[in-house]
Structures are given as structure tokens and as C-alpha cells.
Amino acid sequence: MIIEGLRGKLTANRDLSGLTWLRVGGPADYLFQPADIADLQLFLRQLPADVEIFPMGVGSNLIVRDGGLRAVVIRLGRGFNGIEIEGDQITAGAAALDAHVAKRAADAGLDLSFLRTIPGSIGGAVRMNAGCYGSYIADVFVSAQIVTRTGELLEITARDLQFQYRQTAFPAGAVLVSATLRGTEADPQNLHDRMAEQLKKRDESQPTKERSAGSTFRNPAGFSSTGRADDVQDLKAWKVIDDAGMRGARVGGAQMSEQHSNFMINAGGASAADLESLGEKVRKKVYANSGITLEWEIMRVGEPLSD
């Protein structure tokens, strides 16, 4: 593939396993790492219309199947991780880590503390309406910039995205390049203290030192844990998985964590097929036990290995 005038890096047949937190997956036809927005626009304008694209963040909520992706993976990097603050609004590049945005906002006395423990980057957080402790991107979202499949730079609003629990109506074929969020004013030290406590609780309850992709399934209740003592657990994914006897279940090198049963981990040598098979096994067991159909929160893309 030849695209004239690119300043970013275009790599053919790029293995993706090293770019995902679960460390699995086959190659993409191409990986493009644009230098900046203008470089991304140029690339998409020249890319043949029949070539699929797949925007990829830091790979924190993703299984790439073992056969890889028949697409151009677009991965935003250094030119897309800036964070700017003006008044009560924080504009972050899509590649800015959620945790960094939370900390920079706290330094400025703005509360986006719920982002501190969410793995991944702002681009992915907006696309999936990420949230925890009872707060969601939808609650703080102002606007976002996208580059369309034809290379246009547009601004979109909450009305365009139609936020729901763990999903949005994100425009097909578009790449999110930045988002503007609104934080509420709060004391910086109080915010940092709160985030430190949140991190402590997360590390005590989740396998943060393992190769995982965060929560495997959406909560059947349709909302995130609030973190409060009065939080109801009956329709939480971890609870229905426990009730089905699947805490610690394994397929090959894939395992449902003993520490938190809604976290799937690569316990060593897992393939994408192992991980996906384990997830489907859990879904079947939960349905048989409770009649609840768990929905994947981890995005699964690509093709299995051909026989």
C-alpha cells in the first residue's frame, strides 16, 4: 500500500499481540500510527474506500483473535495524548490515559476522579461510555472531535453519541481524536486522597498485576458498581459468575480470576481462542444456573486461525 505524503508510520502484517493487555492476537494487514490529525486526515482521504479500518487504543479492553485483522489498525500515539484545561473544561487527546486525565484535572481542582481507576485511554472511554463508582463519561461529556472515514474533521455531541450503559452510537468508520469533558470544582488534595483510596480498593479486589482486560462482562443490572457500602450485588456479573461456580475456571492458559471472578486473565500461554472459549463457557454456565445472559464487555475482533 502506498499513501503519498505520510509523516506517520505504516507497517504491513503487524502482529498485534504485543499491543493488547492480554498479549494475544494475530497480525493486522497494516498498522498505521499517524503523526497528528492532519496526517490521519490525509491517510483516510487516500485509503481505498473498500479497506476496513479499526481504531485501537492501548488494547486494555480487547481480544484480537488468533487469525488477526483484515483491516488497517489505526493506533494513536504521542501526537494525540495532550491534555489542556480551560475553566472547568478538560480537553484530552484520544490517546491520553484515563488515569492521567484524572490526575491533571485534580491538580486543577476539577473532579474527574472516577477515571483514575479505569484502564485505557480517553478515546476508548468515550466510545464505550466508561464508568465506575456511579459516574460515567456521559455525565461529564461536552463534545468530541472525530475524523470521518473520508478524512473530514467534525465535532460531535452527546446527542450524536446517544450514551447508554457501556455503549454509544459512535459513527461507523470514524476515528475519535479528542474529547472535552467538564469537571466539577473540588479541593485538589481531597481529590488526590480520594483517588489514592480508590486505587487501594481496586488493588485489593482486582488482579491488577495479572494480564487481564478489565471487566469481562457487563453487569446484568445495567450499571456499574458504586463502591458504596449499600451497593446491591445480586445482579453484578461477578456474583452470577460465582453463583454458577465459575470463579477460577480455566480453558488452556485462560482463567477467570480467583481474586475477582469477572476478570479474565492470561495465566500463561493463553491463545485468543482459549480466552474466548472460556468466556463462552462462563456465559453458558451462568445462563443454565440463573437464566441470565451475560453480555461481553471486552471487545473481540478479527478472525480465528483457519484449520
Image (cartoon, helix red, strand yellow):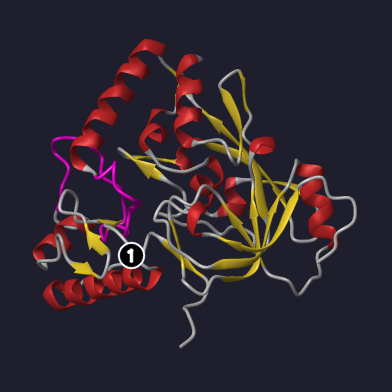
Examine the rendered structure and indicate whether residue 167 appears above or below residue 303: above
Q: Residue furthest front?
A: 269
- Magenta stretch in the rendered image: 207-233
Residue 217: in magenta span: yes
Q: Quadrant of residue 174?
A: bottom right
Q: Is residue 110 left or right of residue 171?
A: left
Residue projecting furthest to the bottom: 307
Q: Position of residue 262 (x, y in %)?
A: 24, 56
Q: Which residue is mark 1?
A: 270
Q: Amino acid at mark 1?
A: Ala
Asked if residue 168 is positioned above or below residue 78 in the image, the reply reads below
Nearest the camera: 1 or 142? 1
Q: Which residue is pictured at 45% across the width and 23% down the height?
A: 103
> Residue sitting at 14 percent across and 56 percent down?
234
> Residue 252: percent from the left, percent from the top?
26, 70
The C terminus appears in which quarter of the rendering? bottom left
Q: Nearer the viewer, residue 263 or 105?
A: 263
Residue 109 visible in the picture: no
**Of helix, strand and loop, which one carries label 1?**
loop
Q: Where 200 falls versus 126 (above or below)?
A: above
Report which quarter residue 15 is drawn in.
bottom right
Question: Where in the figure is residue 83, as x and y percent of width and height?
Answer: 61, 27
